[in-house]
Image (cartoon, grey):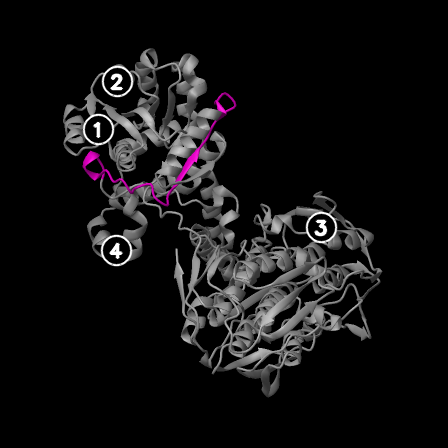
């Protein structure tokens, strides 16, 4: 689009049309804005409010010479409106609309617009207010709200681009969907709720004692039935024009209601809990997606709030961290992510009810939890880190009704590939944009060796998601020598081994975290360890147990480094897991001179835990021993920050795995370090970092792009403790994947961090 339009014609100057006129006017996007409509009074109000330059009751006159026409009339009036404006449309005019049903509108455009139909871009702004009419017009109505475009094969792509840019410039987020998909989704998420609200209020109003019913109605009734106050004429048109999709959605709901009724009638506790816990978490999940957490990239139709009063789409948060400061006090970091994943998986496959304390309520672990709900497992919670899992046994999972969405979680996807390889049903695993670029062949290939039918999407040989698994394939145990140390690959093979005939043995080239082996033992499943090899036999049984998930050492690592580099700091980190396959970060920091003491060592459900006390200390550069690399693979981003504060060079080799995490962590960290004035040299398998030494500002201020990688974002937040200026870190939504509440906790112990939306 050029800088603006010569003339814009708004047909239908209500809330939607009037707000677009106001938005275009406020941003200087049109030389002239006119309106067409039946009501002379409405047009006069539009002129008085300064929304339009002229008003016409003759629609043909209104559109004459316009290069953009926005039709905001009821869906039932679209055909007549198109017929009225078609004769006087300029040859290059672009027409778009705001109708909430697209199939009927597109048919009307094809029938009435003639040669202009290729310049028609069907659209639907998802925005609204309690008040309606031109007097409610608001120039900010579309800011941070969604607009759905549904171009057809006939639509000129250049016209679509102009309309997309127009909506973007008035502050909206623009999505694209197929027209039929739009109508189905809107029927299920907006039209059906309105139908139910109208029906419920009408049903109760017909009762002889309806006055008493409404007198004692509680807040839940008022909230649910609020939308029954919507305009009956408008909703009559919507139900009529989108009849088939509304009927299909109603049938879908009726089937679900029948299942719920049957569960109540039979006193089926598990079925009732299953329905309600799935619904409870699904709603929370949808709200999280609308708030732009890691679920933002889930299927568009699942993430939209399509009520006319829907919330908008907030921007991805930015961390703004002021330089300097010191840390003090106590910081209890969230539960271990690796163990939280495995607790859900093994609890689901166990016989009986498993109770978990300390579950990480971050989005990666919640993706795993939601997946098992989709597989038919009843899970209560999480509530303050407590989860109850009603296990279904090794062979009790049910076929999912849709693709299983892993969000940003590589652990969820890789471990589930192994677990699902032995199921009798087909399934597909998907993820967000970041996860969809990560390699999955390293898991898929050994699973194929076991007899599984696993396919990935070829991407330069890496094999990326979506991952498709064809069920019903008998698995056989294998003796697998891992070419690269990876706890995720090892765990996937062991989980597949639960379903395999015979013995499955995995030998790793270097030690990796052993949570899967430990937890299998805790669930009563025999596992043998022999040096670098782990062995189990298929066909056993897991039995429910109680689990206490310790605080995550990967999350604690940010504070271990922060307190080490900020002069005068002393911090206590309680109840941290110190599994010997995870303590590489402590070993590396101690080699650099960090003052870290391990206190109150104890056992929690088979995992060693302790309180960690860290005091500031002068650090020195080191050559990081390659034997420690697999034991600290997730903590290297923040270790790079420590290296920049140390005296002399720190050199890392043998860390190729860092290049296939949520981002290429070697390159992204190097780019960020260079942006903050730190000298760094990148190697194919590592990096050299020149440290500033004690007493010097290690970093300048500047702008950092985290590339959606939670550990990158948190690492550079800690760098501000030794910076000379403000550090702004962009794209921080995915911090919630592993560390919900990070910003609040960091600020509470002394980091000068604020979050901007």
Q: Is residue 36 magenta?
A: no
Where does the C terminus fall, quadrant-wise? bottom left
Residue occupying the far top of the picture: 87
Badge 2 marks a residue whose secondary structure is helix
Magenta residues, as a range? Answer: 132-157
Q: Earlier in the sequence, mark 4 or mark 2?
A: 2
Q: Earlier in the sequence, mark 3 or mark 4?
A: 4
| Badge nearest the viewer, 1 or 4 | 1
| Badge nearest the viewer, 3 or 1 | 1
Badge 4 marks a residue whose secondary structure is loop
Q: Earlier in the sequence, mark 1 or mark 4?
A: 1
As measured in the structure, the alpha-carbon distance from the residue carrying label 3 to the one carrying label 1 is 63 Å
Q: Which residue is labeled 1 in the image?
A: 52
Q: Main secondary structure of the magenta part?
A: loop
Q: Which residue is labeled 4 in the image?
A: 217
Q: Which residue is labeled 3 in the image?
A: 424
- Across and down, in percent, residue 411 comes to 64, 60
| Badge nearest the viewer, 1 or 2 | 1
């Amino acid at each position: 689009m050029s800088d603006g339009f010569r003339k814009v014609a708004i047909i239908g100057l209500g809330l939607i049309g009037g707000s677009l006129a106001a938005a275009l006017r406020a941003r200087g996007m049109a030389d002239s804005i006119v309106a067409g409509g039946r009501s002379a009074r409405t047009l006069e109000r539009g002129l008085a409010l300064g929304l339009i330059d002229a008003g016409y009751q003759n629609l043909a006159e209104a559109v004459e010479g316009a290069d953009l026409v926005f039709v905001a009339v009821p869906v039932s009036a679209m055909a007549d409106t198109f017929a009225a404006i078609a004769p006087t449309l300029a040859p290059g005019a672009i027409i778009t609309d705001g109708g909430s049903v697209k199939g009927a509108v597109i048919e009307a455009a094809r029938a009435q617009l003639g040669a202009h139909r290729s310049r028609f871009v069907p659209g639907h702004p998802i925005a609204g207010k309690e008040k309606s009419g031109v007097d409610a017009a608001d120039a900010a109505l579309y800011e941070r709200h969604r607009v759905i475009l549904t171009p057809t094969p006939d639509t000129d792509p250049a016209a679509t681009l102009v309309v997309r840019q127009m909506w973007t410039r008035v502050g909206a987020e623009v999505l694209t969907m197929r027209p039929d998909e739009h109508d189905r989704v809107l029927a299920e998420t907006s039209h059906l709720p309105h139908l139910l609200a109208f029906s419920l209020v009408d049903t109760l109003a017909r009762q002889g004692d309806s006055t008493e019913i409404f007198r004692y109605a509680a807040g839940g009734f008022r909230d649910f039935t609020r939308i029954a106050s919507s305009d009956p004429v408008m909703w009559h048109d919507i139900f009529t024009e989108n009849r088939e999709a509304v009927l299909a959605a109603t049938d879908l709901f009726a089937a679900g209601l029948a299942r719920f009724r049957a569960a109540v009638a039979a006193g089926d506790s598990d079925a009732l809990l299953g329905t309600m816990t799935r619904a409870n978490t699904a709603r929370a999940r949808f709200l999280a997606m609308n708030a732009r957490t890691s679920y933002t990239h889930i299927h568009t139709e699942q993430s939209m709030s399509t009520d006319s009063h829907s919330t908008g789409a907030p921007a991805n948060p930015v961390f703004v961290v002021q330089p300097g400061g010191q840390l003090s006090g106590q910081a209890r970091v969230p539960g271990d992510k690796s163990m939280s994943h495995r607790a859900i998986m093994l609890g689901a496959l166990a016989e009986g009810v498993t109770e978990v304390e300390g579950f990480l309520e971050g989005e990666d672990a919640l993706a795993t939890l939601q997946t098992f709900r989709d597989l038919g497992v009843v899970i209560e919670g999480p509530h303050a880190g407590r989860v109850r899992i009603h296990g279904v046994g090794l062979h009790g999972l049910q076929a999912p009704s849709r693709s299983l969405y892993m969000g940003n979680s590589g652990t969820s996807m890789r471990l589930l590939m192994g677990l699902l390889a032995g199921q009798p049903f087909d399934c597909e695993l998907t993820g967000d944009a970041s996860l969809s670029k990560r390699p999955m062949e390293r898991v898929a290939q050994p699973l194929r060796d076991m007899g599984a039918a696993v396919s990935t999407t070829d991407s330069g040989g890496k094999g990326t998601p979506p991952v498709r698994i064809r069920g019903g394939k008998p698995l056989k145990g294998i003796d697998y020598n891992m070419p690269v140390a990876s706890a995720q690959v090892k765990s996937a093979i062991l989980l597949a081994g639960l379903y395999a005939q015979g013995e499955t043995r995995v030998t790793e080239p270097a030690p990796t975290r052993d949570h899967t082996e430990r937890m299998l033992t805790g669930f009563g499943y025999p596992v043998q360890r022999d040096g670098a090899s782990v062995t189990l036999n298929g066909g056993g049984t897991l039995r429910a147990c109680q689990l206490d998930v310790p605080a995550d050492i990967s999350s604690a690592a940010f504070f271990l480094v922060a307190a080490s580099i900020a002069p005068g700091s002393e911090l206590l980190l309680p109840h941290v897991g110190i599994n010997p396959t995870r303590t590489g970060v402590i070993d590396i920091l101690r080699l650099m001179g960090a003052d870290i003491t391990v206190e109150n060592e104890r056992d929690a459900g088979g995992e060693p835990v302790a309180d960690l006390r860290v005091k500031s200390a002068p650090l020195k550069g080191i050559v990081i021993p390659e034997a420690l690399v697999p034991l600290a693979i997730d903590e290297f981003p923040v270790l790079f920050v420590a290296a920049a504060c140390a005296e002399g060079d720190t050199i890392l080799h043998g860390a190729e795995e860092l290049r296939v995490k949520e981002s290429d962590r070697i390159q992204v960290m190097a780019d960020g370090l260079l942006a903050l004035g730190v000298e760094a040299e990148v190697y194919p398998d590592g990096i050299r970092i020149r440290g500033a030494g004690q007493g010097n500002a290690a970093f300048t201020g500047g702008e950092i792009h985290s590339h959606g990688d939670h550990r990158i974002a948190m690492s550079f937040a800690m760098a501000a403790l030794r910076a000379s200026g403000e550090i702004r870190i962009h794209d921080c939504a995915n911090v919630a994947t592993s560390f919900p509440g990070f910003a609040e906790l960091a600020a509470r112990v002394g980091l000068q961090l604020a979050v901007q939306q």
